[in-house]
Each structure stands twice: as structure tokens, then as C-alpha cells.
Amino acid sequence: MSWKDTYQNWKNYQSLDPALRKELDRMRDEKEIEDAFYAPLSFGTAGMRGLMGPGINRMNIYTVRQATAGLASLMLSLGDEIKSRGVVIGYDSRHNSKLFAHNCARVLGAQGIKTYVYDELRPTPTVSFAVRHQHAYAGIMITASHNPKEYNGYKLYGEDGGQMPPKESDLITGYIRKITNLFEIPLADEKQLLQDGLEQLMGADLDQAYLDAVKTVTINRDLAKEYGKNLKFVFTPLCGTGQKLGERALRQAGFTNYELVGEEAQPNGDFPGLKHPNPEFPEAFVRAKKLGKQVDADVLIATDPDADRLGCAVWQPDGQYQLLTGNQIAAVMLHYILEAHKQAGTLPADAVAVKSIVSTEFAAKIAASYGVQMMNVLTGFKWIANLIHQFETQHDHTFMFGFEESYGYLVKPFVRDKDAIQSLVLLAEVAAYYKSRSMTLYDGVQELFQRYGYFREKTISKQYPGIDGRQQMIAMMQKFRDEGIKEFAGYSVVTTEDFSTNTKTSHGQTVELGMPNSNVLKYILDDETWIAIRPSGTEPKLKFYVGTSADSLAKANEKLAQFEDAITKLTQE
């Protein structure tokens, strides 16, 4: 069926949702219509994410129902025990998130599958937590994380609280593609589901259970108690889900001397004044910086709209605030965790930290100095969750910390995804630790640089939007493989890692990497700089990651600029 036929089917459907009908009637540009109807919205191990609106390539009640029907088909194929364990459902502050979440419950309920639905919006990590707490088979979180307001998404968790494994995700995709008519998916009456006990609302009890677990994140309670009232900071949830649980978690840990950014404290799907509600961008801190200067704050902390990512900016002697990178935040948190446990005599002999292959080697050097192993996994927090599960079943390592450069961190594994509420509490404790030494968080990073070397990283994204974007990225990756890359900015490539073939080639010798296959290329240069290339799993972007180091910050910055220029030339050839 052509995109025009699919478009016409939607036009002809008399019972189309009124809001979608209005948008569909507004659409006049043929390219816009083709983009909305040419292919189904991609569904993978990270679920799906896209623009909201009418069409099979958009987030709307019909594509959400289709994805949920695919999950239902998988669960029904696995038997009554799986069906009875049910599915946890949560949602964030975006437009239509609550609507989409309750459509999920109605689809599952129509198949006799129990659901546990949060009674109002919650942070993404609480869904991972609730899956484990309720012993559910799966979890659904309606969120587009830090994307602009026009987007929404569907995130799927497996029974361990980590993102749905590839095998199950592929099976769900197969079931989804068998559904040819999105308008005929059965829906249960939600009032009846609640009466029958097939849908159960969750709220205060689960929040308290989660907060009780968050108490274990604090390492030095005396430090938090002594300096928690003196440490002055600003907290902004960027119009998302982080405010309620974030504040409660801070207060129970002893951190009470903070200010909320008023304009960004309440949930708001329009994200007013925030083009990108993303804590890795300086523009997300404009209001926080203004308030920080008014109240003389030591540090500014922001969580993204679904509260799984966290960023911060720290006070400088010139009165300005300096943003830390995700890698720097991870490094300073990991160092504190290991040092605090070492001082307390509680650092396990089998301690391990985990990071993605595109995250900083700065943290690896810190871990090594404490005799702690740093393990590398593919991008995507599900791979960190997989390792945690392996540690627990094999009893061979104790998980201490996991992170990705994209501002996602996990301290304690009662959640199996990145968790900004945990990170908020730990970062406040780290800031208190440096304040006890008359230092700022920025001073702490500089101290680590002086000890371990000056590390600089950058993620460079090249946009490939529209119908042809995905094919352009595939072609670009194939070109790099076929032609080979021998040097960047005058530095020779000594090792090439191709995760699609699971091979590592160095000095003419090829060995297996021992990792799952993925469309990622990574190059190690003769100065120990590394460069990785991968298509984004959720956005039309080809991402280039650079990690370099030198014996001074100026030299590291200079090298980083050279590599950025080399990457720009590479994509223009």
C-alpha cells in the first residue's frame, strides 16, 4: 500500500479522533503528508519516539495502541502466569502523555492483562522501580525525555526493570507489523477495568517505597547533615516530573537550603522559555543562573522532563556559572563514591563500575586508581542493566556506579535505568563534600584533572531528517567501512572497532570484541584519542563522539577543536 492510500484511509475513517481529524484537515503540504504516512514509526529496543500528529509515522493514540497490542500479543503467547503479572504504566508532563498511557491500559485490559497505572505523572525511573516492586512482566513509560515539545515517545521495560531485551523487542515488532488496521484494535472500558481489578492505580505507597530505597544512595549521612543546611543550590525540573520526588528525596537526605526555579517548577508540556528542555544545553540554565546569582548559590542542578537525566552548573570566582559535561559529572561522582567507601572501609574487593563505549576514559582512570574494574557496554542503559543482572545472578561483582556521557547515571540498582532523582541526591552530597573542603564542584573536577590528566569530550551530531535521512546515515556508515579511515587531524588510527561485525583490528590483527552487534564504529588514535560514530536510535542524527586528553586543559581543548574540524570535513566529502 502506498503512502497516498494510507493517507486516504485515515481521511476516510469516520470515527477518527477529533483532534487528529482537525490536524489532518490542516495538512496541505505533500511532503509533510508523505513523511507522516510513508512508513510506520520505527519500533526498537528503545521503544519508539517521534513527532505527535496524525499518520503511521507519528505518535498518536492509534500508533500507541498498535505498539501496546504488540506487547499484549507477546504476553498472551507466553501463558496465563505472564498475563497475570501485568504491566506497569507511567507518563510524563508532555501533551497527550496521560491520554496515551490510559489508551495502553485499555488495550491491555481488553486482552485480560492486568495493569498498574500511576495516578499522575511520575519520573521515568519510578516505572523501572515499580516493575521490579510489583513483579510485573513489563513496563510502559510515555515520554520523549528531553526532546522538544512537539515530540512524545513510548519506552518499554522488561521484567528486570531494564529496557526490553532485543529478543522480546523483536518479537513485539513482529506482532506490531501483523496489525494491518490500527482503527480496529479492541479497547476495554476503563471504569469497568478499575471495578474488575484489572487496572490498579498506584501512587503514595509506591512513592514511599521508592524514596525508602533512595535513602541508600547517601553514603556519608553525617556529612549531609552537617553541610546540607549550608550548601546553597538551585534546582529546576525544567517543567517536568522531577519536582515532587526530587524535593522529597533531597529533604530526607538533609538538603534543605535550595531554591526552585519558579517558572520551571510545575509540569508544563509547552516547556515555556525552553526550546530544548535538555540539561546538557546552556539555554536550559538561563533562569537557573539568574536565580543562582540572586541567592548566591553554589551550584545549579537541572533534571530533564522525565527526570532520568541530570545536568549542573557550578559557581566560578568571577560570579558566573560553568556547566559541567555529563562525563565530568560522572567522573566527580564516581570519585566521591569510591573515595567515601574507601575511607569508610566499605569498598568491596569485587567492586565494578560500568560505562558506555562512547563515554570518557577519565572515569576509567579514576576507577583503576582504586583498583576498581571499569566495564564497557554498548550505548543504551539496557546494556548496563544487563550487566547488573549478570552480577546479581553470578555473584561475581558488586555494582558501584553506571553512566553514559549523555547525562545519565545510576547509583543503586533498585532502578535499572538512569535515574536523575538518585543522581540529584548524590550530587548534592558530592557538592557538600567539596564545600567541607572549602571547594566547589568545579574545583573538584580541576583537582581530578591535575591528578589524572586533562580529559575533554564532545558529541557532534549531524542531522539527516525526512524520508531519506535513515538511508543517508546507513550509506554514510557503509562508506566509512568500505573506504576505511586511516587518520583524523594528522593522528593515525591504530585500532578500528566495528561493532556490526564484533571485530577489533589493530596492527593488522583482527580479534573478536565479545559484545553484541551494533551499528557503531570506533577508532583509537596513536595519541590515545578515540572517536566513535553511530546513528541515533531515536532521532534522525549521525553522532560522532570524541574523547581526547593532554597535560593541560588548553592543549586538550586545542586537540578537541582539531578533531571537530576533521569530522566536519569527513561528512562533507
Image (tube, grey):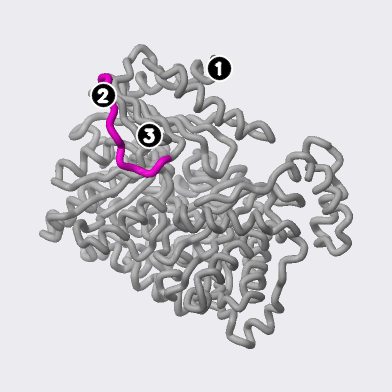
In primary-sequence order, the first of circles 1 and 2 is 2
Q: Which residue is mark 2?
A: 509
Magenta region includes residue 499:
no
Give the left or right position of residue 339, taking residue 520 as reference: left
Q: Which residue is mark 1?
A: 572
**Type of amino acid at the residue the image marks with label 2:** Gln
**Type of amino acid at the residue the image marks with label 3:** Asp
Residue neighbourhood size for the residue with mark 2, other residues' Cα within 10 Å, grouped as few (<14), some (14–19), many (≥20): few
Magenta region, main secondary structure: loop
Q: Residue at x 82, y 51 (%)?
A: 23
Q: Residue at x 87, y 52 (%)?
A: 11
Q: Where in the figure is residue 479, as x and y percent of width and height?
A: 51, 22
Q: Where in the figure is residue 555, as x and y percent of width and height?
A: 30, 20
465 or 393: nearer the viewer = 393
Q: Secondary structure at mark 3?
A: loop
Q: Residue furthest top?
A: 490
Q: Residue at x 24, y 40 (%)?
A: 364
Residues shaded magenta: 507-517
